[in-house]
Structure formats: structure tokens, C-alpha cells
Amino acid sequence: MMAELDQLEDRIHAAVGLLEKFREEKRRLETENRELMDRVHALEVAAGKQAEDLKPKLQALEDERIALLDERRVVAKRVEEMMSKLDQLHKAVHA
């Protein structure tokens, strides 16, 4: 009976040791989790600020893109007109 009680006491001490180990690991993981959450929050704030900082640049690039497309259309129209005039000159010369 005493041997069984000693075994039970050893098991209880082992269980208490495991519980302490698990509690410590839980505290460590909770601390790590809070630190990671803080880092994520800081990164989200920084990303939001960068996005706000980029809005004017993006708008300027979009405006420039639109202006270049308009310019491209004008140049394409002029090239078509010149090709038409060249075609007319070619016909006039060879007529």
C-alpha cells in the first residue's frame, strides 16, 4: 500500500511539474503573441500611412498616363494624315 502511495505521489509531482511547465510555456507564448500583435499593428499603421503618401503620386501617374494617351492619339492622327498626303502625292507623281 505504501509503495502505491509513493507511486501516486510521484505521479502527482510529475503532473504538477508538467502543469508548471505548460503554464510557463503558455505565459511565454502569450507574451510572444502580444509582441507579434503589436508588430502587426505597427506594420498596418505604417502600411496605411504609406498608402496615403502614395495616393498623390498614383494620381499624378494616372494623369500623366492619360496625357500620354491623348498625345499618342494626336500623333497617330497626324501620322495617318501624313500617310494620306504621301499616298496622294505618290498618286499625283505617278499619274
Image (tube, helix red, strand yellow):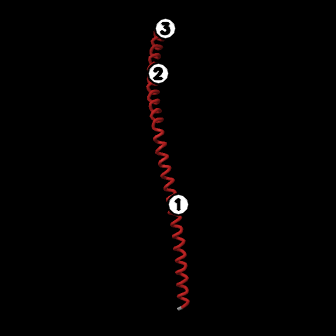
Q: Looking at numbered disc 1 in the image, what kind of residue is underneath it?
A: Glu
Q: Quick one: SS at disc 3?
A: helix
Q: Earlier in the sequence, mark 3 or mark 2?
A: 2
> Between marks 3 and 2, how big is the CA–CA gap?
26 Å
Q: Which residue occupies the foreground of this view, 78 or 56?
A: 56
Mark 2 or 1: in front is: 1
Residue where numbered disc 1 is placed: 32
Badge 3, how many Cα within 10 Å: few under 14, some, many 20+? few
Q: Is residue 13 left or right of residue 85?
A: right
Residue 40 in the image: x percent, y percent? 49, 53
Query: How many numbered marks appear?
Result: 3
Asked if labels 1 and 3 touch by Cβ distance under 8 angstroms, the answer is no
Residue plotted at (56% across, 89% down):
3
| Residue with the most extreme bottom position | 1
Residue 12's x, y, as percent? Answer: 52, 81
Q: Which residue is mark 2?
A: 75
Q: Which mark is first along the chain, 1 or 2? A: 1
Where disc 1 sits, the SS reads helix
Residue 11 x, y percent position in the rendering: 53, 81
Of the numbered discs in the image, which one, if any, rests on residue 17?
Answer: none
Which residue matches tag 3?
93
Which x, y percent locates residue 80?
45, 19
- Mark 2 falls on what kind of element? helix
Identify which amino acid the numbered label 2 is placed on: Val
What kind of residue is marked 3? Val
Badge 2, how many Cα within 10 Å: few under 14, some, many 20+?
few
Which residue occupies the foreground of this view, 5 or 90?
A: 5
Q: Earlier in the sequence, mark 3 or mark 1?
A: 1
State the CA–CA distance, disc 3 to disc 1: 85 Å
- Of the two numbered discs 3 and 2 in the rendering, the one whose residue sits closer to the viewer: 2
Is 69 rendered above or below residue 11? Answer: above
